[in-house]
Image (cartoon, rainbow, N blue to C red):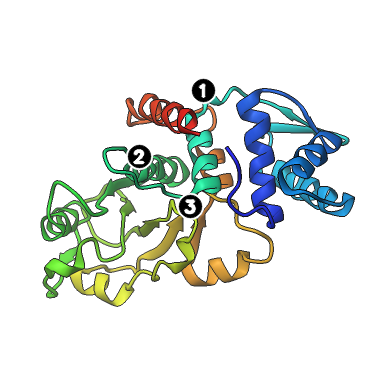
Amino acid sequence: MEPINTDSIYSLADWSEFLVIHNQQELSKAKLASMLNVNRGSIDEEQIDSIFTELSRRHLLYGEYSPFKLNNDVLIPNLSWQDYPEYMMCLIFSLRGVEKRKGTNDGTKLFERLSREAIISYLSPTAEVIGFPNAQSLAKQIEDISKKTCERLGSRKVKPKDKDKGVDIIAWKSHGDLRDNQIVLLLQCGAGLHFGLKKPISLPAWCEFIQWSARPIPGIIIPIIVSIDDWIEVRDDYNLVFDRVRIYRALTGRDLADQSLRAEMLGWCKTKLNEQ
């Protein structure tokens, strides 16, 4: 699997992660330089150093159970991806984006379910996937969530064009006392490469759908790792940011509430990898 943007240090760092974890082999600076010179024609030592500097940053972000280790100029796998298909799925999305092919599963609904699990692990809230398309109408889901959160239903009516009104997951942390006023998250899932084109969630609309007694927190969940340069802008645009690092840290070593999800992600990853 090749990266789409071979001019980006961050994309090449994704590719390096993928090579090490998929192949279960060490990757040195010299070997990466050789591979990139074959694939791109030319790359200098400074660019290779920049890729490994980014990988070193990621190693720190991933934390104690990072999927890879760094030993001087060598990247070393630290897990089997078959045991962590959520990590491989995020890497595939980060490298290739969402590929829609007739008759195939593009993985976006799996990513929504994965995102729900990450949020539950992070905050221990109740969370529901409402992203379009959904078996229930948005109006019915809003009514149900209003009851479950003990928040008053608002006066705004859902229109057919609203679909999911920009929200894929609603999560809330109840106090358990059957009263309103709690932490509420309104989350988008951006599995594609161009998540930055997503419109920020319209809080005024959602505050008219449900009369939240405490203002909800909007956020976005994405399979990439946000670059140092883009972090402030992404944070400003989407408020709470859950990127690949935070998904990984939230789920490492934890059982999933959605018990069939890992097996489904594993099957999806194997299919995508066989397509390449």
Q: CA distance from mark 1 to mark 3?
A: 21 Å
In the rendered image, the vertical position of residue 29 relative to residue 210, given as above or below? above
Badge 3 or badge 2: first in the primary sequence: 2
* Nearer the observer, 49 or 163: 49
Residue 229 screen position, x and y as percent: 68, 66
Q: CA distance from mark 2 to mark 1?
A: 16 Å
What residue is rendered at 81% in x and 38% in y? 34
Q: What number is the disc on residue 222? A: 3
What residue is rendered at 31% in x and 60% in y? 167
Badge 1 or badge 3: first in the primary sequence: 1
Residue 182 screen position, x and y as percent: 33, 59
Left of 204 or right of it: where is 220? right
In the rendered image, the vertical position of residue 86 relative to residue 188, given as above or below? above
What residue is rendered at 69% in x and 27% in y? 77
The residue labelled by disc 1 is 82
Q: Are marks 3 and 2 in contact (CB under 8 Å)?
A: no
Q: What amino acid is found at the position of numbered circle 1 in the picture?
A: Gln
Disc 3 element: loop
* Nearer the observer, 222 or 92: 92
Instruction: Count residues near mark 1 (Cα–Cα under 10 Å), then give few for <14, some for 14-19, many for 20+.
Output: some
Q: What amino acid is found at the position of numbered circle 2 in the picture?
A: Leu
The residue labelled by disc 2 is 110
The quarter of the image holding the N terminus is top right
What residue is rendered at 34% in x and 31% in y? 257
Residue 107 screen position, x and y as percent: 37, 41
Image quadrant assignment for residue 207:
bottom left
Left of 30 or right of it: where is 170? left
* Nearer the observer, 74 or 243: 74
